Amino acid sequence: AVVAVQSGGGAGSGVIVSEDGLVLTAGHVSGRPGRNVTIVLPDGRKVSAVTMGGSEISDSGMCKIKQEGEWPFAPMAKKGKSQVGDWCFALGHPGGFIEKRGMVTRIGRVIHKRYATLRTDCRLLGGDSGGPLFNIDGEVIGIHSRIAKEDDANFHAPIESYLEHWDLFKEGKMISRRDLQKGGFLGVGTEETEKGLRIQQLVKESAADKGGILKADIITAIDGEPIDSQEELSIVVGSKEPGDEVVVDLRRGEKELTISLELGKRPE
């Protein structure tokens, strides 16, 4: 299921995750939706694919093999399964696809995990971008994104970034930072917790500040949509317009609160 993704003069890696040929890769490998790319299978066979949607925030991307068939695929881990300290292994095609060598395996551990990034100490090289990171159960937990010279500074798009926006990606939609910055502005700095997003910072005179949100409040939902990651908060708020009214569900200590407020405009 681990493949190479070729486009123009560039090449990266990817992994097939469905029988009908959906391929996960890095957003900087797939690029804009609607591009034609070539998927190189482990036996050297080449098939055509088209790029779909993705997210600039997490550097996630998706392609679809054009040819119908029952493609070999790897299972994806469930949301939240990977944790700091877990053993994992990285697969990919460093330096590009080499049929006689095949894919290369590197073993390491998850050393940090945030809303849109997962960090490991698996050694990666150019050409690995877009390749899969597996847990010991053989499930995809991430896709290689930013590759560093230091072994403990390699970043991956967590599988949660794909699962949360699966339908959007399949529709060919691209989540861009520029588009989100044009949208509404809440004015909070948060940290992820098991209970939800805890408010760490409030922008003075922002929508959150004026609406009565306090530091240490935990955001659980906006307009009825559960919010459990900073990426999700950015997308939900950024997809609305300044001036739109939203309903924010909060947990303040032992109390459950609901606050209606009007989103502001992002400061210049």
Image: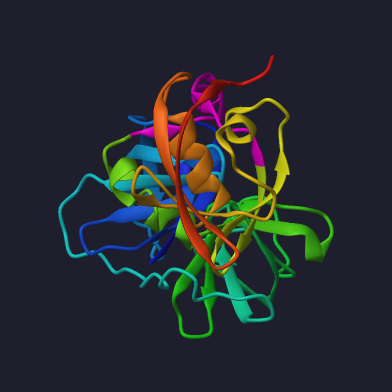
Is the residue 100 above or below the residue 153 in the image?
below
Instruction: Determine whether, in the image, residue 203 is placed left or right of residue 60.
Output: right
Residue 82 versus residue 223: which sits nearer the camera? 223
In the image, residue 175 lies in the stretch drawn in magenta: yes
| x, y percent for residue 130 | 53, 52
User: Which image quarter holds the C terminus?
Assistant: top right
Instruction: Determine whether, in the image, residue 117 is placed left or right of residue 55.
Output: right
Q: Is residue 49 visible?
A: no
Is the residue 176 above or below the residue 140 in the image?
above
Residue 221 versus residue 158: which sits nearer the camera? 221
Q: For the image shown, how many numbered marks are present on the structure?
A: 0
In the image, residue 228 lies in the stretch drawn in magenta: no
Residue 108 versus residue 225: which sits nearer the camera? 225
Residue 41 versus residue 72: which sits nearer the camera? 72
| x, y percent for residue 56 | 54, 37
Name the image quarter holding residue 154. Answer: bottom right
Q: What residue range appears in magenta?
A: 173-188
In the current view of this chain or complex, which residue is farthest to the left? 68
Q: Is residue 43 visible?
A: yes
Instruction: Determine whether, in the image, residue 41 is placed left or right of residue 104.
Output: left
Name the image quarter holding residue 169. Answer: top left
Residue displayed at 48% across by 30% down: 238
Instruction: Determine whether, in the image, residue 18 is placed left or right of residue 209.
Output: left
| x, y percent for residue 216 | 68, 55
| x, y percent for residue 20 | 20, 58
Residue displayed at 73% across by 66% down: 123
Residue displayed at 63% across by 81% down: 86
